[in-house]
Amino acid sequence: MKLSLGTVQFGLNYGITNHSGMTPAEEVKEILDYAKENSINHLDTAPSYGNSEQVIGNLINHDFIINTKTPHFNSCEIGEQDIDVLENTFFQSLKNLKQTCLEGIYIHNIHDMRKKNAEKLFQKLESLKKQGYVRKIGFSVYDGEDIGFLLKYYDFDLVQIPINIFDQRFLVNNYLVELKNRKIEIHARSIFLQGILLSQIKELPPHFTNNTAIFKKYENFLKENQLTKLDGAIHFVNNIKEIDYMIVGVNHVQQLKEILESYNKKIVIEDDVHLLSINNPDLIDPRRW
């Protein structure tokens, strides 16, 4: 498994535990330079991440491998105007990033794929791939039902899933195995649950204060296994053999240094980590916060 650098903080004040705001451009440069020096050459971005793509394009050369995403579509069914928006947004991303070809692009809002004529969105991505503007196409999803639906109707290269110690939905079925059997590249996001898994109980946002029991259980698990919160979050995902990339977002270069130090450790998370799984979407789905 390799590390991929998430970049939403480069263009937005993002994250429920983020008290630093949007990362200044000079700090972004330090982060990107450090990433490159340590063979982290994969970036995950999107046109909806504020001016993240412009910031990246102004600071990097062609050595980074970049995945981006489509815009969201507000229409009830997909029409030619939506296809034009997808195409125009993609070429604007290329321009912003100062690239001639991207590694991958995801359909960002999986609900768009359940609209009438949704196949036109995917056909446009296939066309961009065939023309050599992007190497891989896929989807950003939220749960296993999305995977089942997509595998039934589409032949794709990439998928991005949320997964962490609390959110183990993709481990209770065979979807990860099925994806690998189809040779689909899997990228894991939300491994820190927007920093919730790294926070002290007394520092949790109000949304979580009525559910401190699971956090105490989590801290006891870490203590029993002699793990830091960072080690626990990283190596829970790092131990899942089907995952190809782990996406990590940082605001400061020091955070990336600490992540890389933890990532390079040889740690096996005990099997009873499944006892920390939470089924409450209000706690594991940031869209509900």
Image (tube, rainbow, N blue to C red):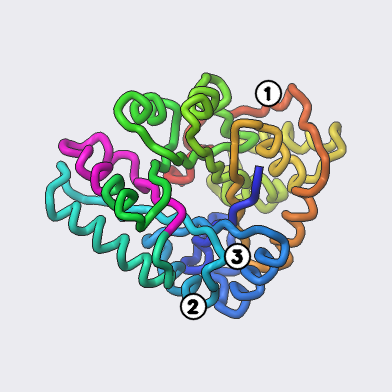
* Residue sitting at x 39%, y 41%: 139
| Residue bounds of the magenta highlight | 102-124
Q: Secondary structure at mark 1?
A: helix
Residue 58's tag is 2
Label 1 vs 3, first from the N-terminus: 3
Q: Secondary structure at mark 3?
A: loop
Q: Amino acid at mark 2?
A: Asn
The label nearer to you, 1 versus 2, is: 2
Q: Residues within 10 Å of mark 1 (few under 14, many from 20)?
A: few
* Residue sitting at x 21%, y 39%: 118
Q: Amino acid at mark 3?
A: His
The label nearer to you, 1 versus 3, is: 1
Give the residue at mark 3. Answer: 19
The label nearer to you, 2 versus 3, is: 2
Give me the C-alpha separation between circle 1 and circle 2. 45 Å
> Looking at the figure, which quarter contains the N terminus?
top right
Give me the C-alpha separation between circle 2 and circle 3. 25 Å
Task: Judge whether 148 appears above or below 79 on screen.
Answer: above
Q: Quadrant of residue 138?
A: top left
Give me the C-alpha separation between circle 1 and circle 3. 30 Å
Percent coordinates x, y for residue 282 in the rendering: 48, 37
Give the residue at mark 1. Answer: 275
User: Nearest the camera: 41 or 248?
Assistant: 41
Q: Residues within 10 Å of mark 2 (few under 14, many from 20)?
A: few
Q: Amino acid at mark 1?
A: Leu
Percent coordinates x, y for residue 110 in the rendering: 34, 40
Q: Residues within 10 Å of mark 3 (few under 14, many from 20)?
A: few
**104 within the magenta span:** yes
Label 2 vs 3, first from the N-terminus: 3
